[in-house]
């Protein structure tokens, strides 16, 4: 499609937002046109759905309804933001994407990893990132960094352990498109590893 699609995945408190911002700034400084976005969200409809998905007032939301809402927000996001940016030759840097649904709903909620993945692939017309960085952190450490936990962050620690393992398993299944990084390192060291991979992928900038 002309552009490059980069996603960040991982558990709560892994530093995804920090690394997404650092990479976007580096790419912009290097002369690339960059679109920063996030899931759920990225569009007005997506942000409205995000408020339901993460709002503590919606505790007890049906698990299948939750998965469908994530897919709905993602379908709108892909159609309105990601695909147009890629078509324009821009670099899209996204905080979470399909793998979060596979990990959190498919595995964490026991809805079926393949079923949830297929739902998002249908919603996005098969759009996948060119590379996904999985920031791996012990859930106990990651959650300790979270202030004012939202509905998903408030789930029991065992749920977050299942999610963590799911991300690692997803990455192991397709090592050419993923890079798992120990998120306990310094932000500078993590950012350097990410830049090295992106620079290689983009042909040296």
Image: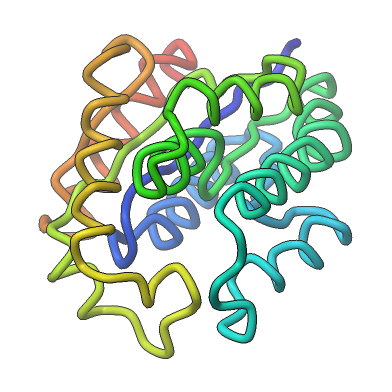
Q: Is 68 in front, or is 188?
A: 68
| Picture mark count | 0
Q: In what quadrant of the picture does the N terminus appear? A: top right
Whole-percent x and y of residue 52? Answer: 70, 70
Q: Observer-nearest residue: 109 or 189? A: 109
Closest to the observer, 154 or 145: 154
Residue plotted at (63% across, 65% down)? 53
Q: Is 171 placed above or below 18 here? A: above
| Residue projecting furthest to the bottom | 148
Establish if 73 lies above or below 166: below
- Tell me where residue 198 sits by quadrant: top left
Residue 165, given in percent of the width and then of the height, sits at 20, 40
Residue 191 position, x and y percent, is: 29, 47
Question: Which residue shows up at 54% across the image and 31% down it?
Answer: 116
Q: Residue at x 27, y 58 (%)?
A: 159
Figure coloring: rainbow
Left or right: where 169 falls relative to 78: left
Q: Is residue 87 above or below residue 22?
A: above
Point 41% across, 16% down: residue: 204
Tell me where residue 30 appears, x and y as whole percent.
Answer: 54, 37
Q: Is residue 65 left or right of residue 142?
A: right
């Amino acid at each position: 499609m002309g552009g490059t699609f980069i996603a960040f995945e991982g558990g709560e408190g892994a530093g995804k937002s920090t690394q997404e911002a650092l990479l976007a700034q580096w790419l912009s400084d290097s002369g690339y046109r960059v679109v920063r976005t996030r899931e759920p969200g990225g569009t007005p409809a997506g942000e409205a759905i995000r408020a339901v998905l993460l709002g503590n007032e919606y505790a007890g939301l049906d698990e299948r309804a939750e998965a469908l809402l994530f897919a709905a927000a993602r379908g709108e996001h892909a159609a309105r933001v990601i695909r147009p940016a890629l078509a324009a030759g821009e670099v899209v840097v996204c905080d979470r994407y399909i793998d979060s649904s596979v990990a959190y709903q498919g595995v964490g909620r026991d809805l079926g990893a393949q079923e949830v993945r297929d739902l998002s692939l249908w919603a996005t017309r098969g759009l996948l990132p060119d590379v996904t960085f999985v920031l791996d952190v012990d859930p106990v450490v990651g959650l300790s960094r979270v202030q004012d936990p939202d509905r998903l962050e408030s789930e029991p620690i065992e749920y977050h352990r299942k999610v963590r393992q799911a991300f690692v398993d997803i990455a192991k299944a397709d090592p050419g498109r993923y890079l798992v990084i120990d998120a306990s390192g310094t932000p500078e060291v993590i950012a350097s590893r990410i830049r090295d991979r992106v620079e290689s992928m983009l042909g040296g900038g």
